[in-house]
Amino acid sequence: MAKKLVLSYGHGSNTAKEARSKFVMHNGKMYEEHTFNAKVGVKTKKIVEAHGITVLEVQPPNKKDVALRTRTNKANSWGADLYYSIHANAGASSAKGVCAFYWSTSKGAV
């Protein structure tokens, strides 16, 4: 199990206004994607920390967008075991599931 987890709450709080996109509908309510992602991320952080995992937030909740290179550099310098980026992607209401990507040359790749 990973001991050092990086959480990135996909996009910053300013992304929706600047890009005029990145919205998510949930239970009939419209959320900026970052707001939705941050709510999921904050709950995730509490759960994993309760299991003894150290968490680093590289795109903090409700803060302006942090450049992707800055996020990944920070995660790599910290020596993260796992980088988890939370996104709520658009799609049909019937769409369900998750997707995971890994760097194929990673020593920890499965």
Image (tube, rainbow, N blue to C red):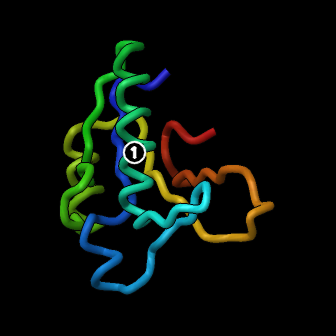
The residue depicted at 47 percent of the width and 71 percent of the height is 23
Nearer to us in this view, 58 or 47: 47
Q: Which residue is mark 1?
A: 39
Work out which quarter of the rendered image holds the C terminus and state it: top right
The residue depicted at 36 percent of the width and 49 percent of the height is 38
The residue depicted at 26 percent of the width and 57 percent of the height is 71
Q: Position of residue 81 (x, y in %)?
A: 39, 34
Q: Position of residue 51 (x, y in %)?
A: 41, 13
Q: Is residue 91 above or below residue 78?
A: below
The residue depicted at 66 percent of the width and 50 percent of the height is 98
Mark 1, secondary structure of its residue: helix
Q: Is residue 27 above or below residue 84?
A: below
Q: Position of residue 62 (x, y in %)?
A: 24, 55
Q: Quadrant of residue 17?
A: bottom left
Q: 69 left or right of 94? A: left
Q: 96 left or right of 38? A: right
Q: 45 left or right of 56? A: right
Nearer to us in this view, 104 or 37: 37
Q: Amino acid at mark 1?
A: Lys
Q: Position of residue 9 (x, y in %)?
A: 37, 53
Q: Quadrant of residue 16?
A: bottom left
Q: How many marks?
A: 1
Nearer to us in this view, 63 or 81: 63
Farthest right residue in view: 94
Crowd band around label 1 with a 10 angstrom C-alpha radius: few (<14), some (14–19), many (20+): few
